[in-house]
Amino acid sequence: MSSIRTLCAAAGLALVGSVWAMPGHAAVQRTFLLQSCTAHDQAKLAGCAAFFSGVLETVQDLQNSSALKREVCLPEKITDRQLREGVVNYMQTHPATSPDAVPAVLEALRALYRCP
């Protein structure tokens, strides 16, 4: 599981750029992700979209790897926006189990897109 978390964090954080630079924090926080994804500011929304583009690409790559156990099975034609809206809605309606964004996103993905 830690390899999935590490890859999602690396992909998502690599894409968010300086808009999301948070001094003193190594990881994007769950509350910061939710605030960015529900903001009216275009720069914050762009950071949110970039984060989820990285998450989607990473999960799709992991699904193609036979070496990793599949915990999340995304629909074949899911868009970044559909993924983002589903995860944000889940995070808004379920209590936080972690202050960090990546574990919260993975929890939502497992709940929303559980493998058969």
Image (cartoon, rainbow, N blue to C red):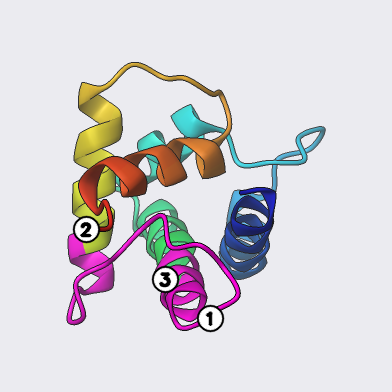
Q: Type of residue at label 3? A: Ser
Helix, strand or loop at disc 2?
Answer: loop
Residue interval drawn in magenta: 54-82
Q: Is residue 92 toward the left or the right of residue 101 in the image?
A: left
Q: Could you tell which of marks 2 and 3 lies nearer the N-terminus?
A: 3
Residue 106 point in image, percent of width and height: 44, 45
Alpha carbons under labels 1 and 2: distance apart: 17 Å
Q: From the viewer's perspective, is residue 70 above or below residue 95?
A: below
Helix, strand or loop at disc 1?
Answer: loop
Alpha carbons under labels 2 and 3: distance apart: 24 Å
Callout 1 touching callout 3 (CB < 8 Å) = no
Q: From the viewer's perspective, is residue 45 above or below residue 73?
A: above
Residue 81 point in image, percent of width and height: 22, 65
Q: Is residue 3 toward the left or the right of residue 116 in the image?
A: right
Q: From the viewer's perspective, is residue 61 above or below residue 69?
A: below
Q: From the viewer's perspective, is residue 54 above or below residue 86?
A: below
Q: Could you tell which of marks 1 and 2 lies nearer the N-terminus?
A: 1
Which one is in front, 102 or 5? 5
User: Mark 3, residues whose alpha carbon is within 10 Å: few (<14), some, or many (≥20)?
Assistant: many
Callout 1 touching callout 2 (CB < 8 Å) = no
Residue 64 point in image, percent of width and height: 45, 83
Query: Which residue in the protein does label 1 denote?
Result: 65
Q: Type of residue at label 2? A: Pro
Query: Which residue in the protein does label 3 denote?
Result: 53
The residue lying furthest to the right in this view is: 24
Which one is in front, 32 or 111? 111
Q: Is residue 3 toward the left or the right of residue 63 in the image?
A: right
